[in-house]
C-alpha cells in the first residue's frame, strides 16, 4: 500500500529570499534608470517619456 501525506498538512508558503532580492533589484534598477535619464536628458524629456510610456500601457 502506498502512503500519502495527510491532506491537513499545509506547507509554508513564504516567498523565497532569492525572489525578494530579484524584485528589490528590479525596482532599484528602474529607479536608477529613471534618475540617470533625468540627469542626462533633463526633466522635460523625462516627463514626456514617462507620459508616453503610461499612454502606451493603455
Image (cartoon, helix red, strand yellow):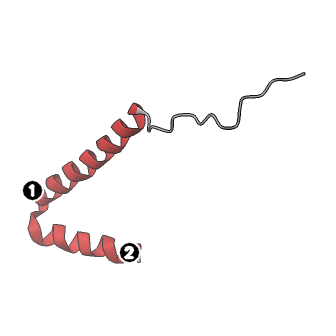
Q: Residue at x 41, y 78 (%)?
A: 58
Q: Is residue 27 left or right of residue 18?
A: left
Q: Is residue 54 left or right of residue 5?
A: left
**Residue at the disc numbered 2:** 56
Question: Where residue 35 sits: x, y (%)?
Answer: 15, 54
Q: Residue at x 40, y 32 (%)?
A: 18
Q: Nearer the viewer, residue 11 or 7?
A: 7
Q: Split into 4 quadrants, where in the image is the N terminus?
A: top right
Q: Is residue 12 left or right of residue 32?
A: right
Mark nearest the camera among 2 and 1 is 2
Q: Is residue 57 left or right of residue 50?
A: right
Q: Pick whichever of labels 2 and 1 is earlier in the sequence.
A: 1
Q: Nearer the viewer, residue 50 or 15?
A: 15
Q: Residues within 10 Å of mark 1 (few under 14, many from 20)?
A: few
In the rendered view, tell whether residue 17 sits above or below residue 41. Answer: above
Q: Which mark is residue 47?
A: none
Mark 2 to mark 1: distance in Å?
23 Å
Q: Which mark is residue 39?
A: 1
In the rendered view, tell whether residue 26 sits above or below residue 8. Answer: below
Residue contact between numbered discs 2 and 1, judged by CB atoms under 8 Å = no
In the rendered view, tell whether residue 27 sits above or below residue 3. Answer: below
Question: Where residue 2 sits: x, y (%)?
Answer: 86, 23
Badge 2 marks a residue whose secondary structure is helix
Question: Where residue 4 sits: x, y (%)?
Answer: 77, 28
Q: Residues within 10 Å of mark 2 (few under 14, many from 20)?
A: few
Image quadrant in which you'd find residue 5: top right
Question: Where residue 6 sits: x, y (%)?
Answer: 71, 31
Amino acid at each position: 500500500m502506498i502512503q500519502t501525506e495527510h491532506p491537513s498538512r499545509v506547507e509554508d508558503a513564504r516567498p523565497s529570499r532569492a525572489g525578494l532580492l530579484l524584485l528589490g533589484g528590479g525596482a532599484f534598477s528602474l529607479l536608477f534608470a529613471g534618475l540617470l535619464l533625468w540627469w542626462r536628458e533633463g526633466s522635460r524629456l523625462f516627463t514626456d517619456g514617462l507620459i508616453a510610456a503610461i499612454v502606451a500601457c493603455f
